[in-house]
Image (tube, rainbow, N blue to C red):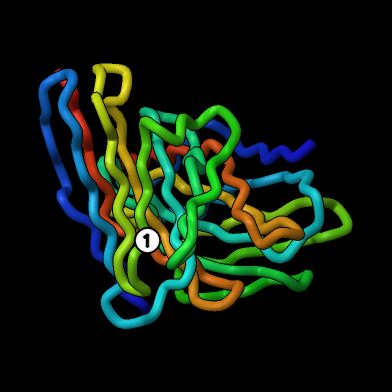
Amino acid sequence: GQNIDQPTEMTATEGAIVQINCTYQTSGFNGLFWYQQHAGEAPTFLSYNVLDGLEEKGRFSSFLSRSKGYSYLLLKELQMKDSASYLCATMDSNYQLIWGAGTKLIIKP
Amino acid sequence: GAVVSQHPSRVICKSGTSVKIECRSLDFQATTMFWYRQFPKKSLMLMATSNEGSKATYEQGVEKDKFLINHASLTLSTLTVTSAHPEDSSFYICSSRQGDTEAFFGQGTRLTVV
């Protein structure tokens, strides 16, 4: 079956670094996405990984290991506005997105 | 990035009435659009895949007659919730992709059925 696991909730301090993990099992693999979703709003795109390794984009970085079915999103220099849910999603062999339940990130001053 | 516009952002309707949600791709041709439903603190749930000029493909468990999808043009797809009931209250989001990578989302519609 297809399954994506990520922690339900995480707490971090403003200015610190946090890593949100995502493990997956899907039918075929055509890439992994990370999205940010603030409460009551639609998700916004953060990153896309299809090859192994680390992709860095400003304060956010995303890592993928296809052999381990594992990804993480790394957020540096945390700001209060980073408080949101972070959704991990994979694209299967039919190019359909399979979504995780999301990780609620709480940033404390 | 590409822009997908979804309206209305919020709607309150009486039980038994129908509600239409529009999703427009403003700067690209969207041959395929996806309709999702999201319950509080839950993942996005794919309801159906809408293809321009043809019938939508519904996911298992989604009632075709209740959630009518029309994709009449390359820039517009609509979702109509017919005979809405309180259990249909949810956050509905449309999405489209350019190629096989990034998905672009509409702003979402918060539907409340009273």
**Which one is nearer the viewer's eye here, A15 or A5?**
A5
Image position of A77 (left or right of A57): left
Residue depicted at 88% across the width and 57% down the height: A67
Q: Is residue B107 visible?
A: yes
Q: Which residue is mark 1?
A: B71
Q: Quarter-wise, where is residue B81 in the image?
A: top left
Q: Secondary structure at mark 1?
A: strand
Q: Chain of mark 1?
A: B
Q: For the C terminus of chain B, which image quadrant? A: top left
User: Residue B13, image x and y in percent?
Assistant: 11, 28
Residue A14 seen anywhere in this rendered image of the structure: no
Amino acid type, callout 1: His
Q: Residue at x 49, y 76 (%)?
A: B98
Question: Where residue B57 sits: x, y (%)?
Answer: 55, 49
> Along the horizontal axis of the image, is B94 left or right of A53?
left
* Residue in the foreground of this view, choosing between B84 and A66: B84
Q: Nearer the viewer, residue B57 or B23?
A: B57
